[in-house]
Image (cartoon, grey):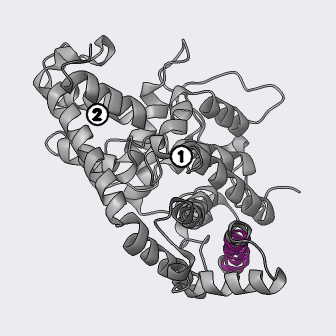
Amino acid sequence: MPLAPYAVYAAVSGGRKFGETPPVDRTEFQRDRDRIIHSSAFRRLEYKTQVFLNHEGDLFRTRLTHSLEVAQIARSIARKLRLNEDLVEAISLAHDLGHTPFGHAGQDALNECMKNYGGFEHNLQGLRVVDVLEDRYGAFDGLNLMFETREGILKRCSLENARTLGDVGTRFIERKQPTLEAQLTNLADEIAYSNHDIDDGLRSGLLDTKQLEQVDFYAYHRREVEVSYPGINSRRAIHETVRRMINAQVLDIISTAGERIQSACPASLEDVRKAVPLIAFSDTMRTEASSLKKFLHENLYRHYRVNRMSSKARRIVTELFDAFIAEPGMLPPDYLVSTGDDSAQARRIADYISGMTDRYAMREHQRLFDMTEG
């Protein structure tokens, strides 16, 4: 099926920072996807946490499994809306590359450490990873991704930061929308983490099904499962319920986006940029999704056991940063700045810490602060 006129076409893309010979037997955005998959930052996502620290169990989601789930959901919707599936997949797989170890607790701690040096934000760091930090190619730093892939990684950005970013910062300055492919990936991300955190929360024992019955959206689909499969065991019932919740949200986006696109009638990508957001939940589904997120914040993300993990994570990140900023000579040589620029050194320390996996950060902390470690 041909792409819609308002989808992103590689032939009229913003292109790459550094010119390259066009790929053979694959599209430009398939090349982006492949570069992301082969990057060091992508492999490290396997050992970066979502909610639960990586060492706490083998069955909980990691940033890697989450990214794969986002890509699957987003591609399914993109196909129905005739958007560029390859671009959607590339953005989905790259959207978490800038995350620190220990999830949002790690990011918050690193941002606090960096408050005098420009702060830290994982979307900006993700762009830095693909533009600068990956060192796989002889001709350029980073992965030299297509403009639309890079733009999609940058989900949000302050005006102050946007002014320093060149082409990908322009839409924030001009208050324009990203591509529909980027809008779609953002929503697929929300669907994936909310619904799969239910599964992980139940698996961990931090949530129980009676609690979840407070959420109308969950309760409705759980009853449907029990009617369809009387006597179904608990584990299967959870999987069936979550699957139906995801499907309901996907179908809602397809329907709502279709109506919004038809109403706005965009004839080109530029029309998309000038319009209101066109990929969205219906008002009813937005209410359901918000209720689910609120429940998870109150009952899972703020659970005392999660708070304990988060406290440990913040302490590890903060103490690592403080140790390295006080004595940069303890850093690996690649992260040392020879100019004496404190801000530049702090940024390299943030690069080092944010690139760590959960277990590497814990091990590095032990090496620095445990006298028995070498």
Name which quarter of the figure residue 279 lies in. bottom right
Look at label 1 and name its amino acid. Answer: Thr
Residue under the point 73% across and 55% down: 75
Above or below, 198 relative to 225? above
Residue 180 is left or right of residue 341, and the answer is right
Name the amino acid type tagged 2.
Ala
Which residue occupies 53% across, 84% down?
215
Disc 2: which residue: 350
Highlighted magenta segment, given as a residue range: 240-261
Residue 91, position as x, y percentages in the image = 59, 47
Q: Position of residue 112 (x, y in %)?
A: 19, 48
Image position of 3 with respect to 227: above or below: above
For label 1, the SS is loop
Other residues around mark 2 within 10 Å, as few (<14) / some (14–19) / many (≥20): many
Q: Which mark is residue 62?
A: 1
Please tell me in which quadrant of the rendered image residue 172 appears: bottom left
